[in-house]
Image (spheres, rainbow, N blue to C red):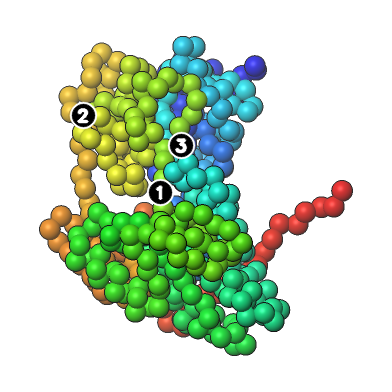
Amino acid sequence: MARINLPEIDKPRIVIIGAGFAGLVLAKKLAKSNFQIVLLDRNNFHQFQPLFYQVAMSGLEPSAICFPLRKVFQKLKNVFIRVCEVQSILPESKQIQTDNGLVNYDYLVLAMGAKNSYFGNTVLEEKTLSLKSVAEAIAMRNQILSDYENSLLEHDINKRQELLDIVIVGAGPTGVELAGALAELRNHVLPKDYPELDLKEMDIHLVQSRERILDGMNPNLCDKALNDLKNLGVQVHLKKRVVDIQDNQVILSTGEKLIAKKVIWAAGVTAATIPGFDETVIHSSKRYIVDSYLRLKSYQDIYALGDVAFIEEQGGHPQVAPVAIQQANYLARCFKSSDFNNKLPSKKFEYFDKGSMATIGRHKAVAEFKKLKFTGVFAWFMWLFVHIYFLIGLKNKIIVLFNWVWAYLFFDQGLRLLIKPKIKEK
């Protein structure tokens, strides 16, 4: 297979697969180093995943949470971006096989992020909506808006119920934030758009297999979030699993059936690994096993970051953005160290837990940092500030802030546009 067109220079080449939080931060930190940086991704833009749900709920436009990679690096001549699909790794020859050719590397960094885990249930994979890319967020928005429009055309109350009701599977931060956003949309925005509809018919179900929503946070915060969701009118089903979906009915492990055409999957993720390594480097969590220097097990020149990395000595870390960013900063310092090629770094990677947070709705949020716990308005403003801070690009920060202020003042989200791709007839 031919090679992808890249300049061959006398600098060692670091190839980074994935332009998520870890890959982008690492590439930026190394852009002025004594390495040639090659960044591979299937998209030519970085996606701010924590706000996908706001695109799906018509709260933000897609361009507000995406940033062109070439704009990030347009003044940095040492970074080369190639848009392609990585098919496999060939570690013996230090090559990467893509759909457009081979890429050689001196050092390889795996930072592909995570994908949905359906726990082996192919029915759920086929019949649920996912939210792991901005394209899927747009598809979800289109589906929701299409069903609202179609419900106006429907005489049969049962079929109208199928169009209006929504089931969200999984009550982690994504599921909780989706449920809260949907409830606020139903309570404040849709009645103005669809005065002919009785939106009391619209049921929002949140299904959680564990005893608490936001499992992993402080129990008091979990209970507070649960009460906030119930006050918004969300029906929460705890200690229940979705086992099947048939004829617009969601079947739970208890035998209960929920009517809904739309089922949103937010129940779990797994690492987006690439073929090329034997099973000895794959942990039972499906992540790559790395040491405390982020090196892939049995390899001296391959590293893994973020959602795909499992530090065996430290028991693994959460698959969240702060972990990915901290690991990218650590590895960048290692690469730029003057004695990088001679010995291991003096310090192992250590994760500093900055806490966790989730927003439920207007003035409703929960946040914790070590022993500090916050709820209500203060936690809500913390959530807004943190997400604005980590967005890339001043323009995007301003656009997102403006949209949030507008929605706050007028209970309105002006992006309820049903835009479908045009398919040319052959």
Residue 59 shows in the view = yes
Q: Residue at x 56, y 86 (%)?
A: 198
Residue 275 x %, y %:
50, 25
Residue 27 shows in the view = no
Q: Which residue is label 3 attached to?
A: 272
Q: Which residue is label 2 attached to?
A: 313
Q: CA distance from mark 1 to mark 2?
A: 24 Å
Of the two numbered discs 1 and 2 in the rendering, the one whose residue sits closer to the viewer:
1
Three-letter amino acid code of the residue under disc 3: Ala
Among all residues in the image, which is located at the extreme left?
371
Which secondary structure, mark 2? helix
Between 69 and 109, the one nearer to me in the picture: 109
Quarter of the image containing the N terminus?
Answer: top right
* 3 and 2 marks in contact (CB < 8 Å): no
**Any mark on residue 268, and which?**
1
Q: CA distance from mark 1 to mark 3?
A: 13 Å
Q: Residue at x 26, y 74 (%)?
A: 376
Residue 320 x %, y %:
34, 47
Residue 408 x %, y %:
41, 78
Three-letter amino acid code of the residue under disc 1: Gly
Q: Is residue 307 above or below residue 188?
A: above
Between 66 and 243, the one nearer to me in the picture: 243
Which secondary structure, mark 1? loop
The crowding category of the residue bearing disc 1, from other C-alpha atoms within 10 Å (few below 14, some 14 to 19, many at least 20), is some
The crowding category of the residue bearing disc 3, from other C-alpha atoms within 10 Å (few below 14, some 14 to 19, many at least 20), is some
